[in-house]
Image: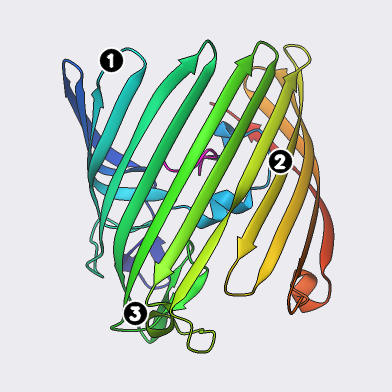
Amino acid sequence: MDHDWRSGDYYTSISDLYVTAGYGNLGVKVGKFASPLSYEHAESPNNFFYSHSYAFLQSPDTHTGIVADYQISCPISVFAGWTTGNDAGLANRFGDSALLAGVRTKIWSGATLSYGMQYASIHGGDYHREFRFSKMYDRYLADGRDLNAYYHSMVFAQNLGKWNYAAEWFLMKANHYSDALVITRGNDDTYSRYGISQYLTYKINCQWGVGFRGEWMRDSDLDVDFYAMTAGANWTPVHYLVVRPELRYDWHHGTNDPKIFNNGNHREQLSGGVSVICKY
């Protein structure tokens, strides 16, 4: 979202706007594009489950900048570039800067392994006395303060015909945390979240698929471990329609064991949902 592109209470939000060029094994992308750092995607139709994992909530949705992709050999490719940080608009009014890089490789038949990272300098700021909010850090950034942040994700995926398995290990770490954020934890200078998400799906037939997702995430600021289990299904009665029901159970525990779910009233939560996607 670009705050500069606004009229009254309405803002212009552009998820993707980029151009690509290529020569031989080299490709270059310039503009605003979806992040390659997470197994899950910001675009809902690309995901099996209706809800998102804890891993996705720590990663950027989009990047704005330039990134080059080079195919070193048949199984190995690398990418690297410069962007304006996390989910920034085309104007980059806060002046963020980030290095984006990674590698992808095929291990054996049907198996791939990828690693992506970002090291960013994030700047705080306010707009009409509203502090800047960062989805990746789930915090409001203080005006005029800087935040050095690192994020990486490693994803292993294995296709076995009707079965598909994937595991993602992620780490998000912010330095100068107490100086950069409105909400702080004593004199702590570092803030991190890390964990593992695992996915297992099975395609029953051309119309039905079922899946399971298991997660664990450690939050160093809260000193709490989060867990989640999600079971869902995909029903495709016609090629342009997908119905995704799911049932999810979240819980947590830690040193202080604060109540986080249901507006701070419970340490566990059972939820469900369904989405209907019409492709055109």
- Residue for badge 3: 127
Residue 81's x, y, as percent? Answer: 22, 43
Badge 1 amino acid: Ser
User: Dot 3, how many residues are within 10 Å of its Cα: few (below 14), some (14-19), or many (20+)?
Assistant: few
Q: Is residue 95 above or below residue 101?
A: below
- Residue for badge 1: 73
Looking at the image, which residue is at 48% across and 39% down?
154
Question: Could you tell me how far apart the alpha carbons at marks 2 and 3 are, in whole angstroms?
Answer: 34 Å
Query: What's the magenta region?
Result: 35-42
Residue 79's x, y, as percent? Answer: 28, 34
Q: How many marks?
A: 3
**Is residue 41 highlighted in magenta?**
yes
**2 or 1: tag closer to the N-terminus:** 1
41 and 77: which is toward the camera: 77
Looking at the image, which residue is at 43% across and 49% down?
152
Q: Is residue 182 above or below residue 117?
A: below
Residue 157 is tagged as none
- Residue for badge 2: 275
